[in-house]
Structures are given as structure tokens and as C-alpha cells.
Image (cartoon, rainbow, N blue to C red):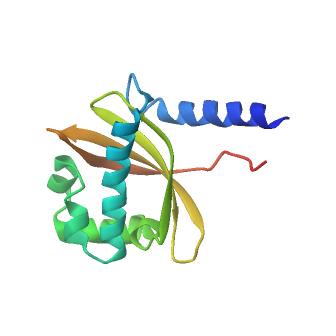
Amino acid sequence: MNARCLLALALLLSWSALAPAAEGLKPSEMKTKDALHAVISGQLAAFRTGDYAAAYVFADREIRSQFPLERFEQMVKTGYPAIAQSVSASFGLTFDNGDEAVVNVRVAGEDRQAVVYQYMLGREGEAWRITGVALLKDQTTEV
């Protein structure tokens, strides 16, 4: 299978993974993509310094109502250890519909093992906030 077919297959598989998250998603424009990536980068940077109060600000109102700060910290540390202790992140496909967004993020933990997550974000006023994170099985093949 040539590189173009593999790329098309990877994009198709990635798009199908996005489908249940939100309706009407389209590839994000650069300005929106930058804003979405900045939110995720900001939260990851806060986690890297152990500043869970700063990371908590990037979570949406619903998450904050379900998880007081102490429970939020514990949930991240136990449920998402690669995120809690990340050393780097790279952004993949980014889609939005103006109110909701989905971003694939490859996160490398302290052990340098990469894990792919799908971040879901939503609008709260003018700001984007993280509404959830799901582990993705990496379905791509290196060429």
C-alpha cells in the first residue's frame, strides 16, 4: 500500500473516531486551532509544574462541578498518569463546529512512551474549556 493510501486510511479512521464526539465538525481554521492548542498546552504546562489549581481553570464548568480541586488532582494522577507527568505533547487532527471541538494529542510521559488522547473542548462564553479526555488507540502505521 503506498503512502497516499495509508494517509487516506489514517485520516478516515481518525475521522470515524471523532464522529461520536460532536456533530458538524470540520477541520479547524488556524485561529481556532491555535486557541484550542493553547488551552491544552496551558493545562499540560500546569500539570508539569504540579500546579493543579492552574490546570483546573482549563476544565469546563461541568468537570469543576463534579470534581473539587483535590478530586480533580487525584483523578488526573490516577486516571491519566501520562498527562499528569507529561514531558511533551504534539497536536494532530483538530476539528470544531464553533461550539465544540476535538483535538488528537500525542503525549509523552516521563518514561518517554507516547500515548494518544482525544481532547474534547467546548465554549464557555468566549473561552474554550476542556470537557473531557479519552485515550485513543493509535491506529496509524509508520511509513
**Foreground: 98 or 115?**
98
Outermost residue toward the top? Answer: 24
Residue 125: x %, y % from top left: 14, 38
Instruction: Please give the name of the residue rendered at 21% of the width and 67% of the height, measured from the top-left corner.
Output: 54
Task: Give residue 84's quadrant in the image.
Answer: bottom left
Instruction: Please give the name of the residue rendered at 19% of the width and 59% of the height, measured from the top-left corner.
Output: 57
Residue 92: x %, y % from top left: 52, 46
Instruction: Please give the name of the residue rendered at 31% of the width and 61% of the height, measured from the top-left corner.
Output: 42
74 relative to 107 in the view: left or right: left
51 relative to 105 in the view: left or right: left
Outermost residue toward the front? Answer: 31
9 relative to 52 in the view: left or right: right
Vertical arrangement, residue 23 with respect to residue 42, above or below: above
Residue 71: x %, y % from top left: 23, 68
Instruction: Please give the name of the residue rendered at 68% of the width and 45% of the height, measured from the top-left corner.
Output: 140
**Foreground: 130 or 88?**
88
**Foreground: 42 or 53?**
42
Residue 143: x %, y % from top left: 79, 48
Vertical arrangement, residue 142 with respect to residue 86, above or below: above
Task: Give residue 25's quadrant in the image.
Answer: top left
Vertical arrangement, residue 63 with respect to residue 107, above or below: above
